[in-house]
Image (cartoon, coloured by chain):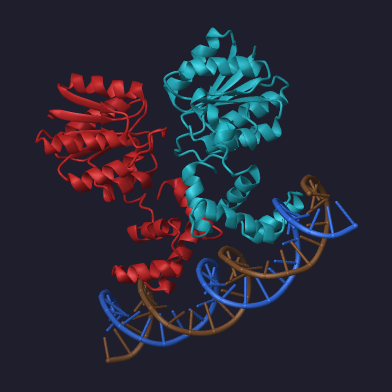
Chain colours: A red, B cyan, C brown, D blue
Amino acid sequence: MFKKVLIAEDMEDINKGVFSLLTELGVTQIDQVQYCDDAYLKIKRADVDDVPFDLVISDLSFKVDHRSQTYPTGHSLVEKLKSEFPGLKVIVYSVEDRLQAVRTLFNLHHIDAYVCKSRTGLKNLTQAISEVAKDEKFLSPEVSNAFSSENELEVDDYDISLLDNLSKGLSQDEISALYRQKNISPASLSSIEKRLNKLRIQFNANNAIHLVAIVKDLGLI
Amino acid sequence: MFKKVLIAEDMEDINKGVFSLLTELGVTQIDQVQYCDDAYLKIKRADVDDVPFDLVISDLSFKVDHRSQTYPTGHSLVEKLKSEFPGLKVIVYSVEDRLQAVRTLFNLHHIDAYVCKSRTGLKNLTQAISEVAKDEKFLSPEVSNAFSSENELEVDDYDISLLDNLSKGLSQDEISALYRQKNISPASLSSIEKRLNKLRIQFNANNAIHLVAIVKDLGLI
DNA sequence: TAGCGCGTTACGGAAAACCGTAACCAACTT
DNA sequence: AAGTTGGTTACGGTTTTCCGTAACGCGCTA
């Protein structure tokens, strides 16, 4: 079982709930933070001091306030953590239940478990912790079909990348140039146009703006 | 005080908390729904039967599941409610604390109160209810500066409407036609172009897609 | 091997967005 | 009364997007 765990969660009551759950599970060293930046600093510090954390349980959404943050969301935090400390286990505990968002967390950020905050949230979190302790992945039942084949959306990583770049303000021409440079295929303007056209039809979008708005709402990007 | 109140909130425990609060305040007729569509149907039905609701307390975010909804968010629900039943009081109770989002709710959808879910959420909600009962508006302390002059962003309702229509897939031409038809000024394509250009500069956006992505992230739309 | 399907790429025209310039009008200043 | 200012509108030209057509390469198969 885990020895040293960090909880990143800005809502005090939930934080408290997770804390007592961990205590019951026999975890003695538990740190809690309400800001992602604090989470990163604590983990970095612990790593430098050679007393690293075993596990991070993080929310996704953190309220913004006066303190400006390097990592404003759990998303950016886990991305950073997993790239800098690949061995660190990460469980995301969030209300977010959009399948694509969950998919992205696993595929892109390589989290170890995803638990939905719900009526049975803490119960699922318990299970997630024991699974992750055994080097297994865990997926909350609410989003368990995120990877089931029947539900497999016809949207792949390339599509996501395309939409993401669009939302960042790149023109289709610029994306084409970028892909050529990064050796991502297909890179031609023509293919990019065609792919976006397919996505527009798929999502019933009138134009590229509409498309990006829709997929942002869906949590794809 | 209010006689007949509807709570629209998908999280059971919070729903329960609000319910007991209302009971303490002496409200006897309390209905609870977990879907926006149910909220609309109940209110519509009550209106038809001439036993209308006095007040709606609604969340903004509702988890999506198998049931496809006409009103997927509290946003769309209150928009519809306020346009069809202008006399109905609406209190929004949500974790959302982005000032622009709150501004939009008041300015565009004309809600009566906004309460942030937080440690002191229920206390603020109590106050909101009594204020709204006196035909006053109420704003949670967390977002009290949403309308303070110093914080006043240079983005007005017209801008928001523009961005909203853009995100819904309308071309600038179509928006122009729509505004002409609805007698919204300025309506010319030229003015719309100019206004969008101003917004692009303001938000450091490369193009319209980028702009919409940014303002969606900021919660303006 | 010839034929077929599929994905990538190229091209060209129509539509829309982008951008600068300028005319017009109302309100306010001097 | 003349001038200034700010907002709306119009127009023209360039760029980008949108959309249909078509060529090319590659793997599969009859």
Residue A6 sits in quarter? top left
Q: Position of residue A85 (x, y in %)?
A: 17, 44
Which is more toward the observer, B38 or A106? A106
Which is more toward the observer, D2 or A96? D2
Residue drawn at (32%, 47%) of the image: A103
Q: Can residue A204 be seen from the camera position used here?
A: no
Q: Position of residue A61 (x, y in %)?
A: 38, 36
Left or right for B124, reference A14: right
Residue drawn at (35%, 50%) of the image: A150
Q: Position of residue C23 (x, y in %)?
A: 79, 67
Residue B127 sits in quarter? top right
Total number of numbered discs in the rendering: 0
Residue A81 to residue A11: above or below? below
Left or right for B133, reference A109: right
Residue B4 to residue A2: above or below? above
Left or right for A13, reference A3: right
